[in-house]
């Protein structure tokens, strides 16, 4: 049996990774306690102090003491309750975890009690407990986070980054509770003051600049309700798109990331956005909790929906309708009438919304006319399928059959330009390569046939103790993509060989990146690791912007790209290929 303090520290490794995760847990507790005003006080990016003061229902003396035990929660009693969650928390892990890795001081009082409770806990040890006079609610100070876990403290990023993490976490929460007042104080200065209001005003207060044009005047309201899902919120007008647009999804009052639904949103904007421009969105889903993965890990923001394939077209249609109604997209073609209806989807995979598969012959040689492949013209017909209107919305790309005889131009060391009959195809070289490497890496992971390139001088990979359980499992995957690793000490591995695809990149940062992404998912989401590993690996090793490519290299890159089943977007939903149509080009003149 591990002593509690150790068990808590291990749990803390998963739940509390940085000041921002601490903020999330504390503020969610305040919300669960029915607070109407929540103050967050931060010092030194939360590293020396993170304090949350609420006017919620507080705790009795016994409850306060109990709250810091592992698996102590007042929010659920049995497994069935998991499917009717009305609270943000339910694991009973957060406070125990925080107390294991910080110096915590709590003041709490229930309305009906005359005296409140003061409790001080350092690294799971109760230092002090006494009755005190204090306002109703809970006032919790987390001091010197990770004071007793130097390895984790070292792992924290610089103040600027942690500060940004804190604010991002804060935004995610305050955007779900506009009716609650929030105050954010940074190093004794009020940074953000959010009065209780409605959603639109809340968005304005956070993201508006107070300039002539309000932020929300650039947004359009969306709303749809049916027996599967309710969707509401705001989306940005296409002309207000920016490079770093604010994009938020929430489900049942929780922030989530959802690359697949992100694609559904972008789908609705097809043809309306400039390159690399993205629309803002604040989209809220309300759905029967039984149809989503409820056992959400506190640090995991990706949520699985049972009916995501049905929700995809509903989302796209809702956005299109809103854009059309507000007349922000007068040129939209609405002749696909049925698109508010739920289309019948027969494909089990969500790839059904992507471009059709183009089969190519690897041995094809354009100079042997007898071998000439007929351009795959008939596949456009796939787009006319009446039950899948969303597909019709996505213009097909005119991909040449061969690239060997095409003169290609590289622009700014970033894009490859490819003239076609329909217009100019622009391919983002870095992202194209990400897709190629992603595909390769996924196959390696599945077939365990990574090619190893032995190193003359092995590297040493030091591992944070708290990551050991993860790394133990991760090495299997790493070996299958071609890392030759042997345990050196209990907390380090010797890297004797690296995957050939790593090319000239040094291995430690790549491994560390992979570990960072895996850590977000946690051990419980093991089945999603492979995609993340592949993406992380591809992102760290893809040819960078600014790299000059020869004709041959460009041709090769495009060949490989267009032989993929999914080439049009990166796995995280970014555009890889864009068509500037003849018509669009014509309009410039
Ligand atoms: P969970 O939120 O998953 O129940 P936590 O460890 O975050 O677990 O909190 C444990 C318990 O402590 C909660 O169930 C709740 O009863 C109590 N608690 C925590 N924070 C507050 C607060 N700000 N106000 C009132 N009660 C709280
Ligand atoms: Mg909690």
Image (cartoon, rainbow, N blue to C red):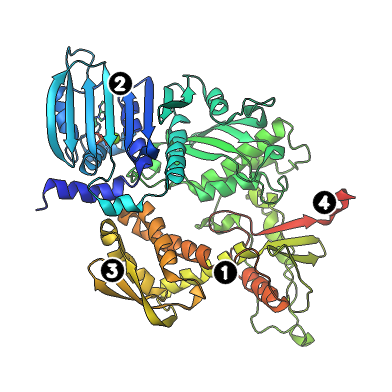
User: Image quarter for residue 23?
Assistant: top left
Per the model, the C-alpha gap separating discs 3 and 4 is: 56 Å
Tell me how many marks there are. Answer: 4
Residue receiving disc 2: 56
Q: Are marks 2 and 4 in contact (CB under 8 Å)?
A: no
Front one among 455 and 66 = 455
Q: Name the spot of residue 306 as percent of width and height, x first.
A: 43, 47
The foreground one among 456 and 248 is: 456
Q: Which residue is mark 4?
A: 584
For mark 3, what is the residue?
Answer: 492
Q: CA distance from mark 1 to mark 4?
A: 29 Å
Q: What residue sits 42% from the left and 24% below the top?
A: 182
Q: Earlier in the sequence, mark 1 or mark 4?
A: 1
Classify mark 2: residues with Cα within 10 Å, few (<14), some (14-19) or many (20+).
many
Dot 4: what SS?
helix
Mark 2 lies on a secondary structure that is: loop
What residue did someone put label 1 on? 436
**Dots 1, 3 in contact, CB < 8 A:** no
Q: Secondary structure at mark 1?
A: helix
């Amino acid at each position: 049996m591990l002593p509690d303090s150790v068990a808590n520290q291990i749990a803390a490794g998963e739940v509390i990774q940085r000041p921002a995760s601490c903020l999330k847990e504390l503020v969610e507790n305040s919300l669960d306690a029915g607070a109407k005003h929540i103050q967050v006080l931060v010092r030194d990016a939360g590293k020396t102090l993170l304090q949350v003061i609420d006017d919620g229902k507080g705790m009795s003396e016994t409850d306060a003491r109990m709250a810091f035990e592992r698996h102590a929660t007042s929010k659920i009693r049995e497994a069935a309750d998991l499917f009717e969650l009305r609270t943000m928390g339910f694991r009973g892990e957060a406070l125990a975890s925080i107390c294991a890795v910080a110096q915590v001081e709590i003041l709490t009082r229930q309305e009906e009690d005359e005296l409140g409770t003061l409790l001080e806990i350092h690294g799971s040890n109760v230092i002090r407990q006494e009755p005190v006079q204090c306002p109703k609610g809970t006032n919790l100070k987390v001091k010197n986070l990770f004071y007793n876990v130097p390895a984790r403290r070292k792992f924290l990023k610089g103040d600027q980054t942690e500060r940004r993490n804190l604010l991002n976490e804060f935004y995610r929460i305050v955007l779900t509770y506009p009716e609650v007042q929030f105050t954010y104080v940074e190093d004794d200065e009020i940074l953000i003051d959010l009065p209780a209001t409605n959603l639109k005003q809340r968005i304005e207060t956070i993201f508006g600049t107070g300039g002539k044009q309000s932020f929300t005047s650039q947004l359009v309201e969306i709303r749809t309700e049916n027996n599967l899902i309710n969707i509401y919120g705001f989306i940005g007008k296409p002309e207000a798109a920016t490079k770093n647009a604010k994009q938020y999804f929430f489900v049942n009052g929780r922030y989530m990331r959802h690359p697949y639904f992100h694609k559904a949103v972008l789908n609705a904007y097809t043809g309306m956005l400039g390159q690399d421009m993205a629309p803002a969105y604040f989209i809220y889903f309300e759905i029967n909790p039984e149809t989503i993965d409820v056992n959400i890990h506190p640090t995991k923001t990706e949520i699985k929906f049972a009916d995501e394939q049905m929700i995809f077209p509903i989302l796209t249609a809702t956005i299109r309708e809103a854009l059309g109604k507000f007349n922000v997209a007068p040129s939209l073609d609405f002749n696909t009438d049925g698109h508010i209806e739920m289309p019948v989807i027969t494909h089990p995979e969500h790839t059904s919304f992507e471009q059709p598969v183009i089969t190519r012959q690897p041995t094809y040689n354009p100079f042997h006319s007898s071998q000439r492949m007929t351009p795959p013209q008939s596949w456009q017909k796939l787009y006319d399928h009446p039950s899948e209107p969303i597909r019709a919305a996505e213009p097909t790309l005119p991909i040449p059959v061969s690239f060997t005889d095409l003169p290609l131009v590289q622009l700014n060391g970033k894009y490859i330009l490819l003239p076609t009959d329909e217009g100019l195809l622009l391919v983002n070289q870095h992202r194209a390569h990400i897709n190629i490497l992603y595909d390769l890496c996924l196959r390696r992971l599945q077939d365990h046939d990574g090619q190893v390139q032995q190193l003359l001088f092995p590297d040493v990979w030091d591992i944070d103790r708290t990551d050991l359980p993860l790394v133990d499992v991760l090495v299997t995957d790493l070996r299958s993509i071609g890392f030759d690793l042997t345990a050196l000490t209990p907390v380090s591995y010797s890297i004797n060989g690296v995957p050939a695809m790593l090319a000239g990149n040094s291995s430690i940062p790549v491994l560390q990146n992979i570990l960072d992404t895996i850590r977000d998912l946690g051990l419980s989401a093991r089945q999603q690791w492979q995609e993340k590993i592949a993406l992380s690996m591809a992102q760290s090793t893809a040819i960078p912007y600014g790299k000059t490519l020869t004709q041959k290299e460009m041709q090769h890159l495009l060949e490989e790209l267009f032989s993929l089943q999914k080439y049009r977007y990166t796995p995280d939903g970014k555009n890889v290929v864009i068509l500037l149509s003849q018509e669009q080009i014509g309009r410039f003149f």
